[in-house]
Image (spheres, rainbow, N blue to C red):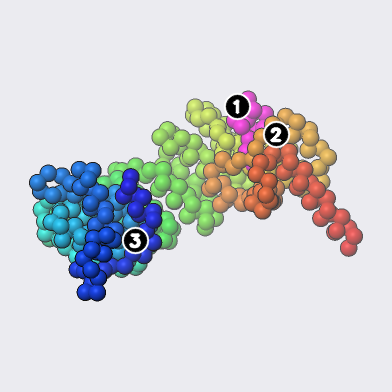
Amino acid sequence: METQCLLRTTPPFFPIVSHKPHPSSSSSNSNNNPPLPRKIIWQWKREGLILGRDNIVDCASLIQTLARKRMPQVAHQLVLEMNSQGLIPNNSTMSALLLCYADNRLFPQAHAIWEEMLTTTSSMPDTEVVSEYMDAYGKMGHFSQVIKILDQLILHRFNLLPEVYPLAISCFGKYGQLDLMEKTLKEMVSKGIPIDSATGNAFVRYYSIFGSLTKMEIAYARLKRSRHLIEEDGIRAMSFAYIKERKFYKLGEFLDGVGLGRKNVGNLLWNLLLLSYAANFKMKTMQRQFLKMLDSSFRPDLTTFNIRALAFSRMSMFWDLHLSLEHMKHEGVVPDLVTYDSVVDAYLDRRLGRNLDFTLNNMNADDSPVVLTDPLVFEALGKGDFHSSSEAFMDFTAQKKWTYKQLIAVYLKKQFRRNQIFWNY
C-alpha cells in the first residue's frame, strides 16, 4: 500500500540516475533523501516480501503499474537498484519488465530482457506475454522483428511451436499483413503442426476485414475442408463483408451453407438471413423465412423484430408493422430506440403524425431510450431519421435522463418547424 502511495506522489518521468553519490553531495544527504527505488526496496524488506535466502523478488504488479503510468524509467531504475542489492527478479517480474519496455517503445531494453529470458531455462515467458510482445512490434509496423521473435522461439523453444505459430499468424492478420500470415501458416503446416479451429477462424476473420470477397471465400473453404466449424466472430466478419459490398444473395447462400439449425450462435444466422431479404425489400420471402424460423423452434428476439419493423416501415406496410408490434408484445420483447424509429418514421413519411398516438399508446413510451439491436442491422439498413436525430440530440444536450415520449415530442416539433420553413419559401 505504501509503495503505491510513493508512486502516486512521483512525477510521471523519473530520471534515470547513477546509484553512486554525486561528488558534491555528502553521504548524510544521500541517506536522508534516498531515491524512490531504494525506498520501495526498503519497504519490501520491512514487509517481508523478499523470498528466502535466494533474495527472489516478485514485483510484477508494480512494474505493470509503472508501465500503465508511462514510467518505464522508474522501472528501469528499480531493476538497477535491485541488482545493486543482490536481489533477483522472478520470472513474472521479468515478463512484466519486458512488456513495460516494449509498450513504451524502449525496444533495445526490451530486446535485452528477451534475449536473457530465452537463454535461461526457467525464465521463459508464457504465451500471453509472447503475444503482447509481438503485438508491441506489430503496432509499430516492425513485422521483421515479429518474424525474428518467431525464429528465436523455433531455435530455443521448439516445444512451444504449436502455441507460438498461431500467435504470429494472429499478429500479422491483426495488422493486415495477409501475405506474411499465409507464409507463416505454410511454414507451420510444413512442420507438421495442424491448423486448429482458432487459427482457421482467425484466417476467415482477417480476410473478411482486409482481403477481397474471393480470398475470404477461399479462406472459408479451407476452414470447411479442415472440418472445423466457423465460430460466431467469423460469421459476423463474413456477413459484414458481404453487407458492405451489398452482396445479399451471396450472404444468404453463405448462411444457408453454415446451417440455419445451429443453436450455439442463437438467432444470429436467422436474423442475418432475414436481414439479407429485408435489405433488398423482398418482403414475401422475408415473411416465409420468418415462419420457417418459428417452425424450427427459434424464438424471435429484439433484433428479429426490428429487422422486420424497419422493412415494414420503409415500405409503409402499416398493418404488418402493427401485427409485428403485437407479436413482439406477446413474446415479452421490450422495444428499443430502433423499434420506436420504425414507427415514428413510417407515420411521418406518410404525413400521419397525428395518428402516432394510436400505436404509441400500446408501447411504454415512458421508458429510457436504449439501443440493443445488433449493429449489423444498421450496416445493411442504415439508421432512420428519428433514430439518428435522437442520438445526436442526447449527445449534445445536458439533460441526462430522457424518455421515448420526450424524444418524440422534440422530434415532432423539429419536423413541424422544418415544414413551416419549407412552405414559407
Q: Nearer the viewer, residue 342 or 280?
A: 342
The magenta stretch spans which residues?
Answer: 322-337
Q: Magenta span: helix, strand or loop, mainly?
A: helix
Residue found farthest to the right = 424
Q: Which residue lies under the disc numbered 1?
A: 332
Q: Quadrant of residue 66?
A: bottom left
Q: Amino acid at mark 1?
A: Gly
Q: Nearer the viewer, residue 238 or 104?
A: 104
**Left or right: where does residue 16 sit relative to residue 218?**
left
Q: Which residue lies under the disc numbered 3?
A: 71
Residue depth check, mark 3 versus mark 2: number of the one nearer the observer: 3
Q: Residue at x 38, y 43 (%)?
A: 231
Tell me if mark 3 has few (under 14), some (14-19) or many (20+) residues whose alpha carbon lies within 10 angstroms of its own. Answer: many
Q: Amino acid at mark 2?
A: Asp
Q: Which residue lies under the disc numbered 2?
A: 366
- In 3D space, how far apart are the residues under numbered discs 3 and 2 (Cα atoms)? 49 Å
Q: Position of residue 410 (x, y in %)?
A: 76, 46
Can residue 333 be seen here? The reply is yes
Q: Position of residue 394 (x, y in %)?
A: 66, 48
Q: Residue at x 29, y 49 (%)?
A: 61
Residue found farthest to the bottom = 24
Q: Nearer the viewer, residue 122 or 39?
A: 39
